[in-house]
Image (spheres, rainbow, N blue to C red):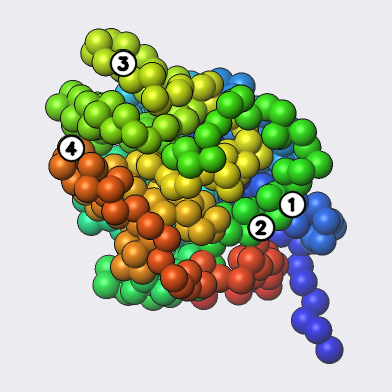
């Protein structure tokens, strides 16, 4: 006889584009398969508040609008995280959930985990155990703290499990695969029916590369940012498409930096448009953790504009090249970009969301 499941209520905290994608997987499954068993209250901190960075994802991914939008907006790390912490505490005191669910490594992740821990509400962290071993990255600090505050840790890879074990975290750790792979498989099937092709930039050559650039380690370092821009501008034999983050656009303008004509900047795109661009491009150039993986999901080589990455298996398998901000390394990566013969199944088989929800509904925390 199957074990009877108990109703579980939890608050999900999201605030940035990658988290909307990850949360969509679980939110959709809850409404399709777990109605009456799980009660989710979805909180958007407002960390990303531009429509092209936020609301469009809820519309495209066919999940309900957030139950609460805290409207925190942008700001320094301390100010932003503090505002989220205060607002989330009020939500949690009012809702009294059995658990708080956080995703990834943003300030929203940190604030959600801290607010819950202070109120002695158990925390589940999706995408736990990732490490770049670069504490100068705000995201690294966020993910480490969130992991140490969580009692359920859902890891995307065996490497993530090993990272947690090295820090003494073994209890409550579950290897479930990557929910972003789930999302990629599900939503890429909607591209042809959604009119996405008509919303892509016109006149794209067959061999364009897709560029994203937004990490603080690059945009907040004038020397790194200038080196990256000058390196990309010098590669005029390669046509790039750059959906530009609003903050990156502001930083480039404030520092008098501009991109050459062979790099076409466009407004931020929705998730389906991003999937379409990833499926059509020849290769990807990025400093985003999520886009590194999405490139791998689509079988596209990736050049990462960082010195380290938490997704080391993509580098070890030859699909991802770390070029940092060094012009010579970036140029060499462009010259040698290629797709390896094999693409291992590092990130599960597309049922990570179901595994996570099964654990959440089992009542087993360890």
Quarter location, residue 249: top left
The x and y percentages for residue 360 are 64, 65
- Pointer 3 residue: 258
Quarter location, residue 232: top left
Give the distance between the C-alpha atoms of the residues marked 1 and 3, in whole angstroms. 36 Å
- Would residue 170 appear left or right of 206 to someone viewing this image? left
- Pointer 1 residue: 189
> Pointer 2: residues within 10 angstroms few (<14), some, or many (20+)?
some
- Would residue 302 appear left or right of 273 to someone viewing this image? left
- Pointer 2 residue: 185
The x and y percentages for residue 48 are 51, 27
Q: Nearer the viewer, mark 3 or mark 2?
A: 3
Q: Nearer the viewer, mark 1 or mark 4?
A: 4
In the structure shown, which secondary structural element does the residue marked by tag 4 occupy? Answer: helix
The x and y percentages for residue 195 are 77, 33
Residue 1 versus residue 107 in the image, above or below: below
Q: Is residue 106 in view from this perspective?
A: no
**Which sits in the foreground, 214 or 65?**
214
* Res. 164 mark: none
Residue plotted at (37% across, 35% down): 238
Q: Nearer the viewer, mark 4 or mark 2?
A: 4
Q: Is residue 213 in view from this perspective?
A: yes
* Res. 327 mark: 4
Give the distance between the C-alpha atoms of the residues marked 3 and 4, in whole angstroms. 16 Å
- Would residue 169 appear left or right of 352 to someone viewing this image? left
Give the distance between the C-alpha atoms of the residues marked 3 and 2, in whole angstroms. 36 Å
Residue plotted at (28% across, 33% down): 235
Q: Earlier in the sequence, mark 1 or mark 4?
A: 1
> Pointer 1: residues within 10 angstroms few (<14), some, or many (20+)?
few
Do the CB atoms of the residues marked 1 and 2 lie less than 8 Å apart? Answer: yes
Q: Earlier in the sequence, mark 3 or mark 4?
A: 3
Residue plotted at (84% across, 89% down): 1
């Amino acid at each position: 006889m199957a074990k009877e499941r108990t109703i579980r209520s939890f608050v999900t905290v999201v605030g940035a584009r990658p988290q909307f994608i990850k949360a969509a997987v679980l939110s959709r499954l809850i409404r399709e398969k777990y109605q009456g068993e799980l009660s989710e209250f979805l909180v958007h901190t407002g960390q990303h508040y531009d429509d092209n960075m936020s609301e469009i994802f809820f519309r495209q991914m066919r999940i309900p609008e957030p139950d609460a939008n805290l409207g925190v907006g942008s700001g320094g790390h301390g100010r932003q995280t503090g505002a989220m912490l205060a607002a989330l505490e009020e939500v949690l005191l009012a809702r009294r959930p059995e658990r708080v669910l956080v995703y990834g490594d943003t300030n929203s992740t940190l604030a959600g985990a801290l607010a819950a821990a202070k109120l002695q509400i158990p925390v589940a962290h999706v995408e736990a155990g990732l490490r770049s071993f670069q504490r100068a990255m705000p995201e690294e600090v966020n993910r480490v703290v969130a992991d140490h505050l969580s009692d359920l840790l859902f890891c995307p890879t065996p490497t993530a499990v090993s990272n947690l074990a090295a820090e003494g975290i073994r209890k409550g750790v579950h290897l479930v695969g990557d929910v972003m792979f789930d999302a990629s498989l599900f939503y890429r099937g909607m591209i042809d029916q959604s009119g996405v092709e008509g919303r892509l930039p016109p006149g794209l050559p067959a061999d364009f590369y897709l560029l994203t650039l937004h990490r603080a380690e690059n945009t907040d370092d004038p020397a790194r940012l200038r080196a990256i821009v000058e390196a990309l501008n010098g590669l005029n034999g390669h046509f790039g498409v750059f959906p530009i983050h609003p903050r990156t656009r502001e930083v480039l303008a404030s520092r008098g930096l501009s991109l050459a004509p062979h790099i076409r900047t466009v407004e931020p795109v929705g998730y389906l448009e991003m999937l379409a661009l990833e499926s059509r491009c020849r290769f990807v150039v990025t400093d985003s953790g999520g886009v590194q993986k999405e490139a791998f999901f689509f079988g596209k080589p990736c050049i990462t504009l960082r010195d380290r990455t938490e997704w080391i298996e993509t580098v070890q398998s030859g699909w991802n090249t770390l070029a940092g901000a060094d012009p010579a390394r970036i140029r060499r990566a462009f010259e040698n970009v290629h797709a390896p013969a094999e693409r291992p199944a590092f990130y599960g088989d597309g049922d990570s969301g179901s595994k996570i929800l099964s654990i959440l509904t089992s009542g087993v925390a360890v």
